[in-house]
Image (tube, coloured by chain):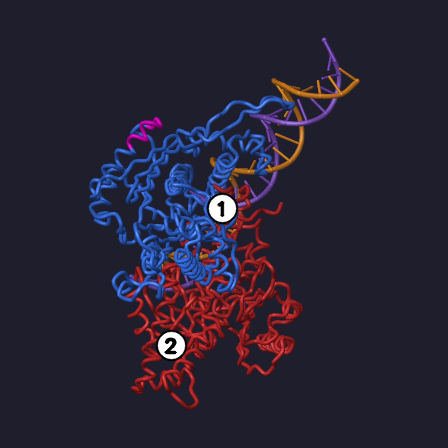
Chain colours: A blue, B red, C purple, D orange
Amino acid sequence: MAVSGSAARPRLIRALNEQLMLDHIRTTGSLSRADLARISGLAKNTVSLALGNLERAGLVRPAGVRTGVPGPAAVLYEVNPDSGFVLGLDVGGQYLRGAIADSAGAVRARATLRARARTGHGRVAALAKLGADLRAEAGFGPGALGQTVLGSPGIYDPAHDTLTLAAGLPGWGEPAVLRELRRTFGTEMVLENDIDAAALAEQAHGHGRDVTSFAFISVGTGIGMGLVIDGKLHRGAHGAAGEIGFLPMDDDRVDLDDVRRLGGGLETVASAGGIVRAARLAGMHGPLSARTVFEAAARGDARARGVVEAEAVLIARAVCAVIAVADPHLIVLGGGVGQAADFLERVAARVRELAPVEPAMRVSALGNDAVVDGCLAAGADRLWERLTAGLAPDTTAIGGIREPV
Amino acid sequence: MAVSGSAARPRLIRALNEQLMLDHIRTTGSLSRADLARISGLAKNTVSLALGNLERAGLVRPAGVRTGVPGPAAVLYEVNPDSGFVLGLDVGGQYLRGAIADSAGAVRARATLRARARTGHGRVAALAKLGADLRAEAGFGPGALGQTVLGSPGIYDPAHDTLTLAAGLPGWGEPAVLRELRRTFGTEMVLENDIDAAALAEQAHGHGRDVTSFAFISVGTGIGMGLVIDGKLHRGAHGAAGEIGFLPMDDDRVDLDDVRRLGGGLETVASAGGIVRAARLAGMHGPLSARTVFEAAARGDARARGVVEAEAVLIARAVCAVIAVADPHLIVLGGGVGQAADFLERVAARVRELAPVEPAMRVSALGNDAVVDGCLAAGADRLWERLTAGLAPDTTAIGGIREPV
DNA sequence: AGACGATAGTCAACCTCACTAACAATCATG
DNA sequence: CATGATTGTTAGTGAGGTTGACTATCGTCT
């Protein structure tokens, strides 16, 4: 019912078709004019015209010829990788990671540092150095059009431009940090929740490739979720979608004082710290971590097995909550605990008892660079939006914005 | 990255602009050619052409002239209300409700019946009669293009074309019922979960009008939610999104045997039945209902107040779960319990203690016909899609479907 | 080796669509 | 009653895509 866009002019056709050519080339790698004509259904000369524009705009370039078939050699076109770059950064409590990719999607450099800084300012400085090193290594000068995406714990609220709940990174929520980041990486820098970024990586390279909706649930030091709906990451009205660490869960395995002190949310009872606490309550001693508890359970320690089983029940409840609210096609479990051996099966068994429907469940196959890769994926989309914005009178008008005259 | 659509032809421009004219007329009521030219920015003659097509297609019609200003009388155009109709039906345990609207959105007839039938077949027959009566009253013959939307409890899974979990309507989940419904109302009939339909009504006429995302949570005989994200109702992969009656909740206010017998979900403990059970456990006697318990609490009965307070805590937890997963802009409380006096405030107070962010919360202002009105709203969209489908080569191609050659 | 068929890319004529500009017709108002 | 504002139409122009013909090129078959 809502009036969706603004008037369509003949120009729009050209813009759409150029975008279409570009999309085809991006997904396929390299194509000739004739290929594009066949795929798109457009006339050959139309394709030639459009491709000429794209080449003149620096977005595509010739990439050799294809022979071996009858007829003249076909000139292949590919995305011009130098038209821009994407810098993905992951700021965690223990490590800083980063990678840089060109606009064709190829990763040109990658790095991991131990996080030494303990202040917001220090972290920004370390990230700035990491970013600069990566740019230099990848060969992008200071003039290149770039998009930076920073994966970080916490909730970024775009409406108020604030970062909150970044536990584990002291000083990281200061407004000064955001200002400093913008100064360092440009106004086009984007913040992404780290788990959300991992979900985007899962969508780009992992189990989320062939479904339109899925939930990536990470259980480790903290607990969080990235929710992809209709192929789009759902961030929520305040950026808090997926903060399932706050799922209300009163559980009897920690004593009530603890619950009151730490908050009754899922993260308190079910994160790595919660597992250790539960293990101690169950009578386990010595230096414990979530990993050692799981290892003890695997060795047959009865107390540890009880703790692991209880953990599975908690996560199963969280999964059920996600299903009951959003019903995604697929649940992907990630994080140190989520990726532990046999854990998925335990969770899935409980889910089957509780949930109204049974979604597919998988263990994430991504590793330490998931957040960085997700940032690259998100940044690539944004970069291409900016690169193609100049092409035409606002193709997004159809999506519902407006057309600048 | 995905190749979104198919090639754009000049035709598409016309299609988009005709759609734009139509949208403007639908939202505004009636407009002249000159008005449309001003609003849209298109040239006057372009508007004339497009409007001519729309009129020839029977979608708009002249609706008098406007005088009083200098110049010739402007011919106003309005949506042709006879171009189609929408039949909205609500099948509940106690009542059958229905209404019929023309394609301009005007409700032409409305009716409510007590549900007498106790079998699937009987209910279909009653609905068929209700629908036929409404059509006759509204003056739509058997040939008119129509869209029927049936709001029903339960989960409709479009992938398998099955209706499940329709508790309270014995026999309603039979495949034969679906077949019979299709035979009666045509293949274009659509099933919508009743709470989802109420959410759509809230979006069309209620508090959901000016937000892009909100959750309509209904607490009454049952518990359910309709989740609107990005302006679109989110049904989920299996149609189970919003089934928050299945939120895992072990609560100490009902004894464990009950929980085991009835299932531990939110619906068991927090629906009207759960309230009565809790009231009895608290020591209240006599013929009880959720309503009488709430009335007793309002009169100051301590036991009843305890029950109401516990209910508020349960619903607050559900709200927190919704926020933690989806973080909508707004939470709307509906249903007999949800709309009870002062209940929202109690819930909101608890939510503030638990949730990571605080969404706005409102009590639904809609009444008994919410489901029917939601079905009409949903049906109107579908009807217009079908009406305008003939106009042009598939305007939705841009949204990502395809273009039939 | 040479003929043949398939393919790549371009050119010219035509169709659709929107825009500009001019124009006739109409109505309120001073 | 003259003037100005406004509606709606007509003719000409430019952008964009399409069809069909045409040239040039390459592999393959005879």
- Image quarter of the C terminus of chain A: top left
Residue at mark 1: chain: A
Is the residue at mark 1 from the same chain as the one at mark 2?
no
Does the magenta portion include A136? Answer: yes
Q: Which residue is mark 1?
A: A207
Closer to the camera in the image, B204 or A98: A98
Q: Is residue B73 visible?
A: no
Crowding around mark 2 (Cα neighbors within 10 Å: few <14, some 14 to 19, many 20+) is: some
Q: Nearer the viewer, mark 1 or mark 2?
A: 2
Could you tell me residue C8's position as x and y percent? 59, 26
What is the number of the mark on residue A400? Answer: none
- Residue B107: image location, x then y, percent: 51, 73
Where residue A277 sits, quadrant-wise, is bottom left
| Magenta run includes residue A75 | no
The residue under label 2 is B253
Q: Which range of residues does the magenta coloring cover?
A: A132-140
Tag 2 secondary structure: loop
| Position in image of residue B120 (x %, y %) | 63, 75
Horizontal side of B214 relative to A353 (left or right) equals left
User: Given the image, on which type of amino acid does mark 2 rest?
Assistant: Arg
Quadrant of residue A404 in the image? top left
* Above or below: residue B376 compared with residue B51: below
* Residue at x-position 47% and y-position 48%: A363
- Dot 1: element: helix
- Going by the numbered disc 1, the residue's amino acid type is His
Figure quadrant of residue B73: bottom left
Q: Residues within 10 Å of mark 1 (few under 14, many from 20)?
A: many
Q: How many marks?
A: 2
Q: How far apart, in angstroms, are the residues tagged by discs 1 and 2?
A: 41 Å
Residue A305 appears in the picture as rendered: yes
Residue shown at 49%/29% (left/top)?
Answer: A78
